[in-house]
Structure formats: structure tokens, C-alpha cells
């Protein structure tokens, strides 16, 4: 059995893995795990990942979870072009630095923005207080400012000469608030220019294909009661 | 200028970096940045234009943040023993898998107790009991996953040898232990794992690294902790307000 990737393109790390594999011509079987139907909670998927999370990778007998781990595994196994995760010590450390920073900051902000702005009111039919929404958007704004200012020294990121894993995990994350209807690029020309460079490096067709689902987030039909009941505890845990 | 590490041993990721550098005989200048004195928000303690966080590595002109990035940088640059960050494809992937999970389930959760028990009183606030309980439940849940899903029957978290993953995990758990929640009690597998990690590191190095955090409550009780300067209050209040 060859490489299998368990993904839902609704999830931002899944999009990063998908784009990376496609862009680098890595052959894989796509196993779609529909989060909004609770398929990640099914007995079948728990066999793959007991932690009930996507993305997950299966390569023969070897099962791997966590997007950064999967991206690095694919990078090393398939010997992709060096710019994704450079051999040079300092350039690579920049990519590691950015990915670690994002995991505990931007990631949560983007996730909360999507859920509080769209998924709770539209998909789950749960009202969100204006204060919660405003606080979430303010936090997102502050984090985007850090991101754009480059004060975090993410020199591998906006301004780096070639696309790296850092750019890919960043853009797929930022498309979450975009899918929620936030105009995050409009007042941020540096960020906008960077996002266009990343999209061009990935290729517009692939980029759009990977983001088709998230860009339709506000059109998702409301969840039925049983699905909602199944999803709710994990959604609440995830959002905190 | 050689290698400099900007650290405060009260911080879990700083301790992981410190213990790794020391254990591997990596020569560095220790630049202590005392978080409780607000030195991370004052000028002159961190490298210029640095975000207000530790650990920071400075290697000549190269400045690097984030403990995971620093640990990987050190293990590659100083070619530390393979087992810390193995070149084998699958073994290394297991470390990144753990660190990814750790960032979600451990990192933001296990540090909360220091904030609620020590820092909050110093800046004159009290964290609601409801949040303290919620944090305690999140810690318990993460410990169970750590024990069942990661450690299992193995000697260390990702295999039979100690790795960067074990260091990151141990330091987080020690934070909770120091704040009087003995997470190893009633969890014999985790306790045995701790014993194995500490045996690799050596008792002296563990004592030296864990001393400050293990003494923190006693220092607080004896009013021996520094006054947090007013300019550091806003950042600390913000961090406290973010406790879920």
C-alpha cells in the first residue's frame, strides 16, 4: 500500500499538507475525513488516529499525525526542492522558528475567528456574543500586526527569496479568516503582496482548488441535531 | 562573540534549552532574563528588536526564538548524540509528532499554575476558581493522553532512547509539580519515565535546573520574590486574562 493522506480541506493544516504533496508531485491516495459530519470521531478513523485529528498520514505500516511532522516527513522522504526546508542551518532554523511561533499564536486566532464569526452562528446555530466576536477579531488583528511587522524575525517569511514550509503553513492559516469574510489583506499591503507571491509560487489553480471549501464556509448548511451534539464538546475544547 | 542563551529557569522551555546545552557540553554564555523583575519588557536585557519572550539564542549575529527551533539548531550545529534528534526518517517524525501535540495540549496549559498561584497575587489579581478547576481538568486530560497515547509501554515518549521530546515534556510536568500538584503520584508509568529521563540527565544537572522553580512557592510564602515593576504589569495582566 502506498501513501495515504487523511484530510479535510476545511482544516488549515490539511490544506498545507494537500498543497505540499500536490505541488511536489508526491503520489498519494486521498482519504477524505469529513469533519462536519463527525467522520473523525468514527471507529474507522480512530484506528488511524486515536487522537481523532486530521491530518494523518499512512505510509505502509507507519502512521503519522500532526501537520508539521507530516510536512517534514514528506520533505525528507521525497527529497523535494531545498527551498521548502533548507539544509542551511540558519535558514532552516527560521522555518522551524516560524512554525513553532504560529502553532501557539496565529493558529488559534484564525481558528477562533472562523468559528465565532461563521461556524457557530451559521453551521451550529449558536449565537456568539458581540463581545466575544470583537475580542477575537482584536486578537487576530494584533497577531497579524506582529506577523506583518516581521518583528518576530520571520525573515524566512514575507521577504524570503523562495517559498518555504513556513509560507505554506502561514497562508493556509490566513485563509481561515478570509473564509470567514475578514478582509485581512485590504489594509495590509505588505501582507497582500506576500500572499500573492505565495499563491503564484504554489500555482493559482492548485491554490484555488485547496481553498474552495473554506471560501464557501458561510454557505454550509446548518448541522442537524445529532451531528451538532456529536461535534459540540470537541469544538468547545478546540476553541479554548 | 560565542553562543549566548537568554533564559529564565522559571520558564519550562528555557529549562529544556538549558538542560540540553549543559548535558551536551555546549559552551554558552548564560544571559539571565528575570521574568518576575519584568526584564523581558525592559530595554537592555534581550537582544535589540527582540520580541518580549525567552528563550532566545544569539550566535554571533544570528538571533533565534522558540525553544523547538533552538533545540534543533543546537543539535544540528553541535552534532549532539543521534538519539536526541535522530536522523532516521520515522524516528525523527515521531519527535515532531509529539512536539505538535505538545504545542496544542501541554504548552499553554501546564504553565497556568505558576500564573494563578504566584504571578497573579504579585500583580494584585485573582484568577477565578472556575478557571483554576478547568485548567486542572485540562492538565489531567493531557496527562492521560501523554501516558496512554505517547509513552505507552516504551522507555521514552517516542522510543527506547531519550529525545528532545522527553526534555520538553519533563520541564512542563516539573512546572506543575513545583506548584504542588504532584502529577507523578498515582501514575507509575509516568513516574518511571521521569526517573529514566532524570537518570540520563544526572541528578546534579536536574537539581541545578529545577531548583528555582521547585523553590518558588516557598519564596512566595516568605515574601522573597521581587516586586514586579509597573511597566511589566500590562503584559502580565494580559497573559492572565487569556487563561481560558
Image (cartoon, coloured by chain):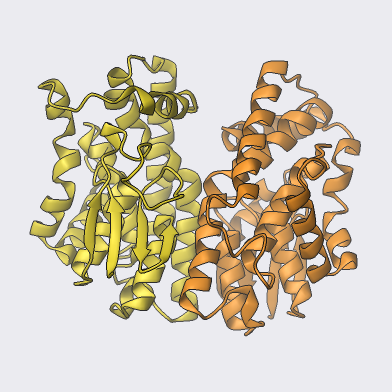
Chain colours: A orange, B yellow
Q: Position of residue B138 (x, y in %)?
A: 44, 34
* Residue at 43% in and 25% down: B240
- Answer yes or no: is residue B183 visible: no
Q: Is residue A209 above or below residue B15?
A: below
Q: Position of residue B47 (x, y in %)?
A: 38, 53
Q: Quadrant of residue B56?
A: bottom left
Q: Is residue B239 left or right of residue A112?
A: left
* Residue at 73% in and 55% down: A172
- Answer yes or no: is residue A69 visible: yes
Q: Is residue B137 above or below residue A207?
A: above
Q: Position of residue B79 (x, y in %)?
A: 32, 80
Q: Is residue B205 left or right of residue B192?
A: left
Considering every residue shown, the one lying at the far bottom of the view is: A79
Q: Is residue A60 left or right of residue A171?
A: left
Q: Quadrant of residue B42?
A: top left
On the rendered image, what quadrant is the N terminus of chain B found in?
bottom left
Q: How many marks?
A: 0
* Residue at 28% in and 26% down: B228
Which sits in the foreground, A93 or A123?
A: A93
Amino acid at each position: 500500500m502506498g501513501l495515504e493522506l487523511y484530510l479535510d480541506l476545511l482544516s488549515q493544516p490539511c490544506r498545507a499538507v494537500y498543497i505540499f504533496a500536490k505541488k511536489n508531485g508526491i503520489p498519494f491516495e486521498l482519504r477524505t475525513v469529513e469533519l462536519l459530519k463527525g467522520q473523525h470521531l468514527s471507529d474507522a478513523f480512530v484506528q488511524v488516529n486515536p487522537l481523532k485529528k486530521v491530518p494523518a498520514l499512512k505510509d505502509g505500516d507507519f502512521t503519522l499525525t500532526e501537520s508539521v511532522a507530516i510536512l517534514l516527513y514528506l520533505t525528507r522522504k521525497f527529497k523535494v526542492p531545498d527551498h521548502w526546508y533548507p539544509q542551511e542551518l540558519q535558514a532552516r532554523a527560521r522555518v522551524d522558528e516560524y512554525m513553532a511561533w504560529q502553532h501557539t499564536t496565529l493558529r488559534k486566532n484564525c481558528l477562533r475567528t472562523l468559528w465565532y464569526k461563521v461556524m457557530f452562528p451559521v453551521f451550529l446555530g449558536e449565537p456568539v456574543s458581540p463581545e466575544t466576536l470583537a475580542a477575537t477579531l482584536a486578537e487576530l488583528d494584533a497577531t497579524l500586526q506582529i506577523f506583518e511587522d516581521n518583528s518576530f524575525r520571520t525573515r524566512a517569511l514575507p521577504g524570503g527569496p523562495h517559498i518555504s514550509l513556513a509560507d505554506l503553513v502561514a497562508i493556509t492559516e490566513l485563509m481561515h479568516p478570509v473564509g470567514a469574510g475578514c478582509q485581512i489583506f485590504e489594509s495590509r499591503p505588505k501582507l497582500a503582496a506576500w500572499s500573492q507571491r505565495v499563491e503564484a509560487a504554489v500555482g493559482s489553480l492548485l491554490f484555488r482548488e485547496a481553498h474552495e471549501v473554506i471560501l464557501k464556509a458561510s454557505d454550509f448548511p446548518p448541522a442537524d441535531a445529532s451531528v451538532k451534539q456529536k461535534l459540540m464538546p470537541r469544538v468547545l475544547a478546540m476553541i479554548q | 562573540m560565542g553562543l549566548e542563551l537568554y533564559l529564565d529557569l522559571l520558564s519550562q522551555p528555557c529549562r529544556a534549552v538549558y538542560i540540553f546545552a549543559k548535558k551536551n557540553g555546549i559552551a554558552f554564555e548564560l544571559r539571565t532574563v528575570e521574568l518576575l523583575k519584568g526584564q523581558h519588557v525592559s530595554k537592555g536585557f534581550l537582544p535589540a528588536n527582540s520580541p518580549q519572550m525567552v528563550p532566545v539564542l544569539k550566535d554571533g549575529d544570528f538571533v533565534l526564538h522558540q525553544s523547538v527551533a533552538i533545540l534543533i539548531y543546537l543539535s544540528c550545529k553541535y552534532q549532539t548524540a543521534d538519539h536526541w534528534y535522530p536522523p532516521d526518517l520515522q524516528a525523527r517524525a515521531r519527535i515532531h509528532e509529539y512536539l505538535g501535540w505538545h504545542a496544542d495540549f501541554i504548552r499553554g496549559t501546564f504553565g497556568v499554575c505558576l500564573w494563578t498561584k504566584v504571578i497573579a497575587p504579585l500583580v494584585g489579581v485573582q484568577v477565578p476558581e472556575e478557571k483554576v478547576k478547568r485548567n486542572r481538568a485540562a492538565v489531567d486530560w493531557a496527562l492521560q493522553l501523554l501516558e496512554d497515547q505517547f509513552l505507552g509501554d516504551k522507555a521514552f515518549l517516542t522510543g527506547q532512547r531519550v529525545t528532545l521530546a522527553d526534555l520538553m515534556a519533563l520541564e512542563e510536568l516539573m512546572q506543575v509539580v513545583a506548584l504542588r500538584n504532584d502529577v507523578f503520584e498515582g501514575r507509575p508509568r509516568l513516574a518511571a519515565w521521569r526517573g529514566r529521563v532524570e537518570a540520563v540527565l544526572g541528578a546534579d544537572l536536574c537539581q541545578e535546573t529545577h531548583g528555582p522553580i521547585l523553590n518558588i512557592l516557598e519564596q512566595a510564602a516568605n515574601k522573597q520574590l521581587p516586586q514586579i515593576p509597573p511597566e511589566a504589569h500590562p503584559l502580565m495582566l494580559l497573559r492572565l486574562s487569556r487563561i481560558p
